[in-house]
Image (spheres, grey):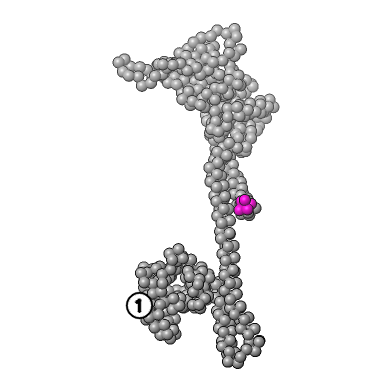
Amino acid sequence: MKRLKRIFTGALPLFLLLWGVMTWGFWVLSQQKLEGEVQLAVQSAQQSAEGYYQNVWTGGATEARKPAILTSWLENRLDSYDGIIQFRFYSADGQELARSQMANSNAFLPGTSTLDWHLWLDPVLSPEEQVELAQQLREDPSLQFFHALPREPDMESETDALWCDVVGVVDEERQIIYPKTITYVYDDREVPVVDTDSSFFEGKELSTMRFEGITLHSALVARNASPQAMLNQWQELEKKLDLLFDGVDVQMGPFSSVSTGTNTACYPLSDGTLFGYGFSYTPLYQTIEELKSPAMYTLLAAIFMALYTDHRQRQAIQRERDFARAAAHELKTPLAVLRAHAEALREDIAPEKREQYLDVVLSESDRMAALVGHLLELSRPEVKGTKETVDLAALVREVWAPLALPLEQKRLQLRLELAEVSISGDRAQLGEAVENLASNALRYAEPDGVIRVALEKLGHRARLTVYNDGPNIPAEDLPRLWEPFYRADPSRSRDSGGTGLGLAIVRKAVEAHSGRCWAENRPSGVAFFIELPFA
């Protein structure tokens, strides 16, 4: 519980805030992108509607059929944006010529393949039936197209569709049917698509027509929005167009901007016909659908980063605590020794012991000075001086030359195998790293043993290997040797005279030069490696 409380009061709120700002930015960009796309779609639909009018009114159809043909061509072009677009045409004397239909259907008779019959559903379907039809088409998109291919004798049919029966009121002159029922007939079943009890049919004669193919579309079928939501948009837009044409100013220019909500406009065409249109779309569904996956992934990433940051913070705090505890422990013993010997000197001990006690005081003082110096070394910036070309072979020889006496005292044999290698770096910092490796080898090498130092080129890197024949180190301790104050064998560390910071200084120097360091056990000793790039 404490950890969860720390996460929710620490890094997580910050990352969630950043996620929220980023998501809001994505939302704004998505809205702008969507507005641009809708603007292009509306302009394209507007131009197409004007083109349809010119083609129909200058075509060879009868005057009675022209409005029906134009009406059948006015389709909703914003369904993929969860929107509605409606068109209207009025003659110069104010007579309505054509308007967009909520449900649009065209059919062709057997053997013609020409969609020259128009099924007008809007006058006969209630709003609830329009929603029901749209829901049916949404659930089964195959109902939008019905085509019965002609059957050849003695040949297997390519489809099981037979014909489409439409029962309704027929207007022969305009080739319009007001359907009461629309039924798709197949080999083994009949599918009723429309079946209404509208009062429109009271007192009217019903006829049955059989078609070979039919298209059936509803403006209430959208990508994400429900048919009911689309119906609300349609009705709202229809009201605004009614208001527009009730008090229209024919001098109004064409609409040229796009924004969320509803927009309407009208203007006269070249022959005086008044053309009007309006569109409405809801960006919420589209934007949510577009941002759903990115928002989810980025939210998971934010939570992961918060947990990871909390983990790293806890690690850093724990390292600082361990470092402070270890430093205090390392200083505690020499301080206790100093105090004990100082008190003994204060007690005016025997003169023959005074010099021995003073030697201990000086030794422990030197030990603390070395420890403080190493602590300061670890706290310095990554690279202390200006980089220069460093001859590593000469540097290794320079470090080992003053150690001839300690080598002789432990009867150790030093073997140098040095290739001539130069790199760019801080000579002083690299020298400290080599010195610490040398001190470590001297400290743990067995008397009468061997220390081998090798320098070689490996591609674009230089590798320095320092081997001593001391005892192996437990495998689980090898990676931690480079941590401050960490020792694989604490029982012998203080007796050996080390501060526990030498290898940590080596790692700091190597990483400052973009290199790496590690240790490996050998059959009869331990080898320490550092690798440095040439550039």
| Residue 373 in which image quadrant | bottom right
Q: x, y (%) of residue 441?
A: 43, 76
In the foreground, 341 or 445: 341
Find the magenta span and give its range. 1-5
| Residue lying at the far left of the rendered structure | 154
Residue that label 1 marks: 417
What residue is drawn where x is 54% and y is 28%? 221
Q: Is residue 483 left or right of residue 153?
A: right
Q: Is residue 517 left or right of residue 68?
A: left
| Residue lying at the far bottom of the rendered structure | 351
Q: x, y (%) of residue 436?
A: 47, 76
Residue 275 appears in the figure: no
Q: Is residue 505 left or right of residue 245?
A: left
What residue is drawn where x is 60% and y is 45%? 28
Q: x, y (%) of residue 519?
A: 42, 68
In the foreground, 367 or 360: 360
Query: Quick one: SS at disc 1?
Result: strand
Callout 1, which amino acid? Glu
Please determine whether, in this image, residue 71 is positioned above or below residue 201. Answer: below
What residue is drawn where x is 50% and y is 22%? 216
What residue is drawn where x is 55% and y is 38%? 289
| Residue 92 in which image quadrant | top right
| Residue 263 in which image quadrant | top right
